[in-house]
Image (spheres, rainbow, N blue to C red):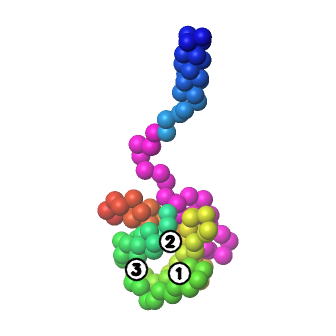
Amino acid sequence: MKHFAVLTLLASLLFTASCITQVVAPSSSPVAVTNQHYGLMGTMTADLNCSAFEADKAVRAAAEAMKILELHRTNDQFGVVYEYKDLYENRVTIKLTSEPTGICKIAIKLGKTGDKKFSENFLAALEQALHGTPAE
């Protein structure tokens, strides 16, 4: 009877041990900017896999890296709207909204018609700021 109980215990331990999987953290940091889309009206949208606080810091750091000057920043219950101007006095509008799921969404538009290359460069600078790597 003792052997049966010990064997049953060992079998159950082996069975439950085989069900446990070890989760290993990825060696490289996850992509921070995903789901990029350039719209017809010239607005680049993307999802940021970070909190609103981290996204706010990263937007300001990316703007500094892109050498655009802040005109004003408006906070409301839906998110943050940034107004910048570039070297050629073009207005840059950046809208940052936070979803209840913890993902932030960003929309970038240069001037009235938008500029895809500028938006892509800004998102690259934003990703660098989110990862904490210095801008080039």
Q: Amino acid at mark 2?
A: Ala
Do the CB atoms of the residues marked 1 and 2 lie less than 8 Å apart? Answer: yes
Q: Position of residue 4 (x, y in %)?
A: 60, 12
Where the N terminus falls, by quadrant?
A: top right
On residue 80, which mark appears?
1
**Among numbered discs 1 and 3, the one appearing first in the sequence:** 3
**Looking at the image, which residue sits at the far right?**
40
Task: Using the rendered view, name the quadrant where residue 134 is placed.
Answer: bottom left
Q: Position of residue 10 (x, y in %)?
A: 54, 18
Residue at the disc numbered 3: 68
Mark 3 vs mark 2: give the one in front.
2
Which image quadrant: the C terminus? bottom left
Query: What is the CA distance from the residue labelled 1 to the residue labelled 3?
Result: 17 Å
Residue sitting at 50 percent across and 71 percent down? Answer: 52
Residue plotted at (42% across, 63% down): 130
- Amino acid carrying mark 3 in the image: Ile
Query: Magenta segment, which residues?
Result: 24-49
Q: Is residue 62 magenta?
A: no
Q: Is residue 80 visible?
A: yes
Q: Earlier in the sequence, mark 3 or mark 2?
A: 2
Give yes or no for contact between labels 3 and 2 (Cβ–Cβ under 8 Å): no
